[in-house]
């Protein structure tokens, strides 16, 4: 079985993380922003799993499970906030909710 | 009779408390009874003490009556103690007796005034303070009395407080004397730190033991004490407050600003004479200050219009004589003049008060005239007091005291012909200004519009004026010169405390000197007669361009007030205005301003936009990673 070198997995994880960050920064729709955060979380998870596989340790997969749980909690809170915003401002534009400026 | 001395200040103090607390609620009759009665009791105690003192002279020449320990802090242990020796006995006799007479006069003078009880309360407090000052055994207690009389002076100058001018005069008096008091308190600190005590007797003996004559410390201490004395006694250059102090009721002017308080400076110098003798340069300064002051104030008195201001300048001038006497070392002559001056100047002020009340509170002598017939009591009071002030030979007290000072100015240990000359010229000026006043106010027939007398003196005023008139004449018996039987009773008595007048040979005899004084008196009298009776318009005609300028200059007290206004008051006010917003605050205000600005800049980054924050986080993380990679 041909093994995939660690570098490849890490590069992929880095690219995914960068794409997620880019989406987080440039998109205004909060649904897409949440999705971008998911992508970033999964990029981190991928890095954990790849590293775990490389060193033959189960810790990477354990950490990935933890990341999944955190992501689920994050999505629950994020979607609730998103709904509240939608009720209050009738929009999903992240820049619309800027009342808390200095 | 030691053990009862404390009553002398305590009785007036108790009466002050009673009057201050309930005075406005009891009828005036009770107020006068309490106010005058307290002083009468004080006088009686003083007389009893005097009798006991003369009957059985105490060992060491003094009774010391310790009352209680005032403070006990780390070696600083001043006592509340009273001391009765020859000097303080003479002073307390004068103070209590003249106070009694003036209090009696005030009953008539102040009758009907709405502040009747307040007036007597202040006056009693004054007598208590003055007695404390005179009897104090400790310089700190003396300072307490010193400040007490200053306070009463302030309260009484501004007695009619509804007129802002009176309040301004009171503040001026208080502030100007404060300059001197500051010097005096520095002197106390210096003496205590150097000699370790403030008890006068111990202080003087330690000073004589430890300090060589003419060295820096006694000179400094004596100069500082002189500063205090100059302020209180209205001598050059702090004399500016006394003429303005005439804003107070006339009895208080008589008591405080003529007879007693203003002579406290002379008393202080005499009390600390051992220290002054260790400082010959300061003695010379005392004499010169006295000599110059008596001339300057005499000239100013010549041109005043206000009857009380004339007397005020006269007081400054006469205290100048006392300082002159102290300065040349003729201590008992100074005290003698202090005593006679208290008599005749109080009499003059009382007479002036009668004139003022009769003329509807008019003070300008040139709006009076021909008052001899309508106001005989005031006329005789002025004539006797004025004659004594000017030194009418042989029959008046002022002649003997002034003659003694004039002679001592040359023949005393520190005497000089120039000082003698100044005092003789001063005698001429005195005679001129007082007879100018008398001729202008009382001279002339019914030339003026029919004089309508608003208020005639009642029996209390007449009695007290009579007593002082008698004393102004008979006071001379206290100290008869050698050519008249040689009975210097007062001088002998004071020798127990003050050094005996040691005479050096003068250029002329005592009789000769007194002849010259008589001549000066006569010239002044005749000049006043010629100028103000024979040719009344002459003073106006005399005032050419130079004369008018000189007149104005003298009228404004040699420009002292103006100078102080420009040198001290104006710059101070300007500085106060500039500093109204407190310059020191500018720094703190800058710090606050900077903080607010920084905050505003930081607040601008709080956009409220989530993506902006996210960008910040990303940028920060990248930066951190970069740094980690760079500096690993």
Image: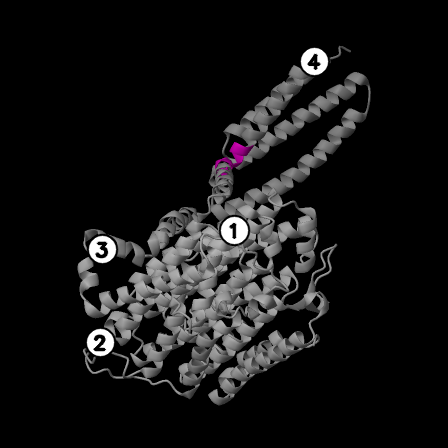
Discs 4 and 1 carry the same chain letter: no
Discs 2 and 4 carry the same chain letter: no
Which secondary structure class fits the magenta region best?
Answer: helix
Q: Residues within 10 Å of mark 2 (few under 14, many from 20)?
A: some
Q: Which residue is mark 4?
A: A7
Cα–Cα span, label 2 and label 4: 131 Å
Quadrant including the C terminus of chain B? top right
Q: Which residue is mark 2?
A: B444
Q: Residues within 10 Å of mark 3 (few under 14, many from 20)?
A: some
**Label whose residue precedes the other's in the sequence (3 or 2):** 2
**Label whose residue precedes the other's in the sequence (1 or 2):** 1
Q: Are marks 4 and 1 in contact (CB under 8 Å)?
A: no
Q: Nearer the viewer, residue B467 or B448?
A: B467
Of tags 1 and 2, the one toward the viewer is 1
Cα–Cα span, label 3 and label 4: 113 Å
Residue B342 placement, left or right of A37: left
Q: Which residues are magenta?
A: B600-613
């Amino acid at each position: 079985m041909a093994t995939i070198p660690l570098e490849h997995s890490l590069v992929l994880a880095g690219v995914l993380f960068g794409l997620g960050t880019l989406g987080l920064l440039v998109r205004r729709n909060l649904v897409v922003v949440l999705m971008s955060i998911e992508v970033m979380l999964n990029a981190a998870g991928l890095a954990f799993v790849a590293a775990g596989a490389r060193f033959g340790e189960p810790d990477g997969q354990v950490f990935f499970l933890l990341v999944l749980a955190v992501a689920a909690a994050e999505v629950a809170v994020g979607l609730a906030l998103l709904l509240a915003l939608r009720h209050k401002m009738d929009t999903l534009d992240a820049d619309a909710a800027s009342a808390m400026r200095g | 009779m030691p053990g009862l001395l404390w009553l002398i200040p305590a009785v007036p103090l108790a009466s002050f408390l009673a009057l201050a607390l309930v005075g406005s609620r009891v009828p005036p009759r009770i107020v006068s009874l309490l106010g005058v009665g307290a002083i009468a009791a004080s006088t009686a105690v003083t007389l009893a003490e005097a009798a006991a003192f003369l009957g059985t002279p105490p060992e060491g020449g003094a009774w010391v009556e310790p009352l209680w320990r005032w403070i006990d802090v780390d070696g600083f242990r001043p006592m509340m103690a009273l001391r009765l020796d020859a000097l303080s006995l003479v002073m307390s006799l004068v103070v209590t007796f003249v106070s009694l007479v003036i209090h009696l006069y005030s009953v008539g003078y102040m009758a009907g005034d709405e502040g009747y009880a307040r007036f007597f309360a202040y006056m009693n407090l004054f007598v208590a303070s003055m007695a404390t000052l005179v009897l104090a055994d400790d310089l700190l207690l003396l300072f307490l009395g010193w400040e007490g009389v200053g306070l009463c002076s302030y309260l009484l100058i501004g007695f009619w407080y509804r007129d802002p001018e009176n309040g301004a005069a009171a503040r001026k008096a208080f502030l100007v004397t404060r300059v001197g008091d500051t010097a005096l308190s520095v002197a106390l600190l210096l003496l205590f730190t150097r000699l370790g005590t403030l008890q006068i007797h111990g202080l003087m003996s330690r000073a004589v033991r430890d300090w060589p004559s003419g060295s820096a410390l006694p000179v400094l201490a004596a100069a500082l004490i002189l500063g205090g004395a100059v302020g209180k006694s209205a001598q050059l250059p702090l004399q500016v407050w006394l003429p303005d102090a005439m804003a107070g009721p006339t009895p208080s002017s008589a008591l405080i600003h003529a007879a007693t308080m203003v002579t406290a400076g002379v008393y202080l110098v005499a009390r600390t004479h051992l220290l002054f003798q260790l400082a010959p340069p300061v003695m010379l300064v005392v004499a010169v200050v006295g000599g110059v002051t008596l001339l300057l104030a005499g000239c100013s008195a010549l041109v005043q219009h206000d009857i009380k201001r004339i007397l005020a300048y006269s007081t400054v001038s006469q205290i100048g004589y006392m300082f002159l006497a102290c300065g040349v070392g003729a201590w008992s002559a100074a005290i003698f003049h202090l005593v006679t001056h208290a008599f005749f100047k109080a009499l003059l002020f009382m007479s002036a008060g009668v004139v003022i009340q009769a003329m509807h509170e008019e003070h300008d002598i040139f709006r009076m005239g021909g008052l001899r017939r309508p106001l005989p009591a005031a006329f005789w009071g002025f004539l006797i007091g004025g004659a004594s002030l000017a030194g009418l030979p042989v029959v008046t007290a002022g002649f003997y005291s002034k003659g003694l000072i004039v002679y001592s100015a040359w023949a005393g240990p520190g005497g000089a012909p120039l000082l003698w000359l100044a005092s003789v010229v001063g005698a001429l000026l005195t005679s001129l200004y007082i007879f100018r006043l008398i001729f202008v106010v009382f001279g002339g027939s019914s030339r003026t519009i029919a004089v309508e007398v608003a208020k005639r003196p009642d029996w209390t005023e007449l009695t007290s004026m009579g007593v002082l008139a008698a004393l102004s004449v008979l006071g001379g018996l206290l100290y008869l010169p050698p050519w008249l039987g040689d009975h210097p009773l007062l001088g002998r008595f004071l020798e127990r405390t003050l050094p005996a007048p040691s005479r050096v040979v003068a250029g002329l005899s005592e009789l000769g000197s007194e002849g010259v004084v008589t001549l000066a008196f006569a010239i002044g009298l005749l000049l006043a007669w010629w100028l103000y009776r024979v040719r009344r318009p002459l003073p106006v005609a005399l005032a050419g361009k130079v004369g008018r300028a000189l007149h104005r200059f003298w009228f404004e007290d040699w420009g002292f007030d103006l100078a102080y206004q420009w040198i001290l008051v104006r710059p101070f006010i300007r500085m106060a205005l500039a500093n109204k917003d407190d310059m020191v605050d500018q720094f703190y205000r800058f710090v606050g301003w900077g903080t607010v600005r920084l905050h505003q800049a930081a607040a601008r980054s709080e956009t409220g936009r989530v993506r902006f924050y996210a960008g910040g986080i990303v940028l920060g993380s990248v930066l951190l990673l970069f740094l980690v990679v760079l500096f690993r």
